[in-house]
Image: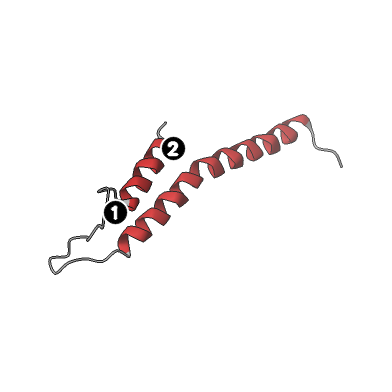
Amino acid sequence: MPFDPAQRHQIEQYAITAAWEAERLAPCDDAVTLLREIADLQTDDDGDLILGADANGLNDLLSRIAAFLAKHDQ
């Protein structure tokens, strides 16, 4: 049994909404991954995070956070 135009339109709208929601959730997944990595970092006796830096004074995690923010800035 074929769908009537209203049903067809509603199905198309569901598909569009699902695609839009998937696009919006992808950055959230990336953010959760970064937050989990931050949570796994070492802390000192006061509970402060220990963020290491390379010889140039750059920190990989902070660079990745900055790249994430730049990528998802809307």
Residue placed at 17% from the left, 65% from the top? 47
Q: Which quadrant: the C terminus?
A: top left
The mark nearer the N terminus, 1 or 2, is: 1
The answer to which of 20 and 57 lies nearer the viewer is 57
Q: Are marks 1 and 2 in contact (CB under 8 Å)?
A: no
Q: Which residue is mark 1?
A: 54
Q: Residue type at mark 1? A: Asp
The answer to which of 59 and 69 lies nearer the viewer is 59
The answer to which of 4 and 21 lies nearer the viewer is 21
Mark 1 crowd level (few <14, some 14–19, many ≥20, 10 Å Cα): few
Measure the C-alpha gap from mark 1 to mark 2: 24 Å
Residue placed at 25% from the left, 57% from the top? 51
Vertical comparison of 13 with 62: above or below: above
Vertical comparison of 47 with 29: above or below: below
Residue 62 picture location, percent across and down: 31, 48
Residue 19 picture location, percent across and down: 60, 40
The answer to which of 8 and 35 lies nearer the viewer is 35
Residue 54 picture location, percent across and down: 29, 54
Vertical comparison of 58 with 13: above or below: below
Residue 50 picture location, percent across and down: 22, 61
Q: Residue furthest left?
A: 46
Q: Residue type at mark 2? A: Lys
Number of the label disc, if any, that sits on residue 34:
none
Q: Which quadrant: the N terminus?
A: top right
Number of the label disc, if any, that sits on residue 71:
2
Q: Is residue 50 left or right of residue 30?
A: left
Residue placed at 66% from the left, 39% from the top? 15
Vertical comparison of 13 with 68: above or below: above
